[in-house]
Image: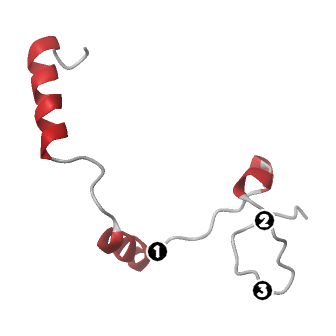
Amino acid sequence: MIDLLTPCSPGDPGAIEMTWMDVPGDKLLEPVVCMSDMLRSLSNTKPTVNEHDLLKLKKFTEDFGQEG
């Protein structure tokens, strides 16, 4: 049996406190994500670009093409 690590609360039985950088890639068991998790995340997520950024991208594409 392979012991995998998954995110949990500090008070969970058997919890081991560590950062993401401490977790070996081959030992990570990603948590199950369901639709309600995604919808809750989307309701709290702010855009990472604004209208000005989109206009700059459009101008760049017009000047240099999609492949740059």
**Label 2 or label 3, whichever comes before in sequence order:** 2
> In what element is the residue under mark 3?
loop
Residue at figure coordinates x 87%, y 81% from the top left: 14
Of the pair 7 and 53, the residue shown nearer to us: 53
The spot of residue 67 in percent (x, y) is 25, 16
Question: Which residue is under mark 1?
Answer: 34
Label 1 close to label 3 by CB (< 8 Å): no
Residue at figure coordinates x 10%, y 24% from the top left: 59
Task: Check disc 1: other Cα within 10 Å, few if <14, some if 14-19, many if 20+.
Answer: few
Q: CA distance from mark 1 to mark 3?
A: 21 Å
Question: Which residue is under mark 2?
Answer: 5
Which disc is residue 14 wearing? none
Which disc is residue 12 wearing? 3
Vertical relation: 63 (above or below) 58: above
Q: CA distance from mark 2 to mark 3?
A: 13 Å
Task: Determine whether, in the image, residue 60 is placed left or right of residue 68.
Answer: left
> In what element is the residue under mark 1?
loop
Task: Check disc 2: other Cα within 10 Å, few if <14, some if 14-19, many if 20+.
Answer: some
Q: Which amino acid type is marked by label 1? A: Cys
